[in-house]
Amino acid sequence: MIIMKDLMKMDLNNLMDRNLFDILNLRTRYEQIVSFRKTYDLPSYSSDIDSLYYFINNGAKNNRFRKRFDEAMIIAKDIIKSYEDEKIDLSGVHRQAE
């Protein structure tokens, strides 16, 4: 299980070693944090890409003093970074041989 001090040590620029299971575990962890007792002021407590973008861009306004907000923000940014890197890297996979 990933804990806060482990998250702080993560190098967000080195996400190429992430596999699908790591990302799914992070999504579950994020959902556990923000949906606990429904104390976070969010339109959705899911970890889909749109909800994560909303949390990163607007979540601090009403939630920055909530318990474990910093951890949830780190996880959300990590998932988004992995998603964006995957979108970029997938285009090179389908190159045609010359």
Image (cartoon, helix red, strand yellow):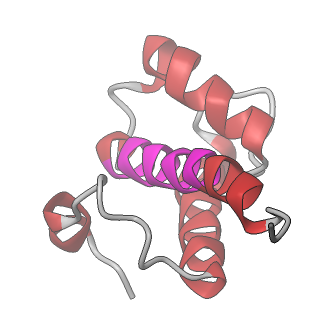
Q: Position of residue 78 (x, y in %)?
A: 44, 53
- Residue 39 visible in the snapshot: yes
Q: Identify the residue shown where x is 36% and y is 25%.
A: 64
Residue pushed farthest front? 98
Q: Position of residue 12 (x, y in %)?
A: 30, 54
Q: Identify the residue shown where x is 39% and y is 35%.
A: 66
Asked whether 74 falls inside the magenta stretch, the response is yes
Q: Identify the residue shown where x is 69% and y is 28%.
A: 42
Image quarter (top left, top right, bottom left or bottom right) of the C terminus = bottom right
Image-based side of 11 in relation to 33, left or right: left
Q: Identify the residue shown where x is 62% and y is 57%.
A: 89
What segment is highlighted magenta in the picture? 71-85
Image-based side of 14 in relation to 92, left or right: left
Instruction: Identify which residue, 66 or 21, lies in the foreground.
Output: 21
Q: Position of residue 19 (x, y in %)?
A: 57, 82
Instruction: Identify which residue, 26 or 14, lies in the foreground.
Output: 14
- Residue 41 visible in the snapshot: no
Residue pushed farthest top? 61
Instruction: Identify which residue, 89 or 85, lies in the foreground.
Output: 89
Instruction: Report the number of numbered marks.
Output: 0
Asked whether 75 falls inside the magenta stretch, the response is yes
Predominant secondary structure, magenta span: helix
Q: Position of residue 16 (x, y in %)?
A: 44, 70
Image quarter (top left, top right, bottom left or bottom right) of the N terminus = bottom left
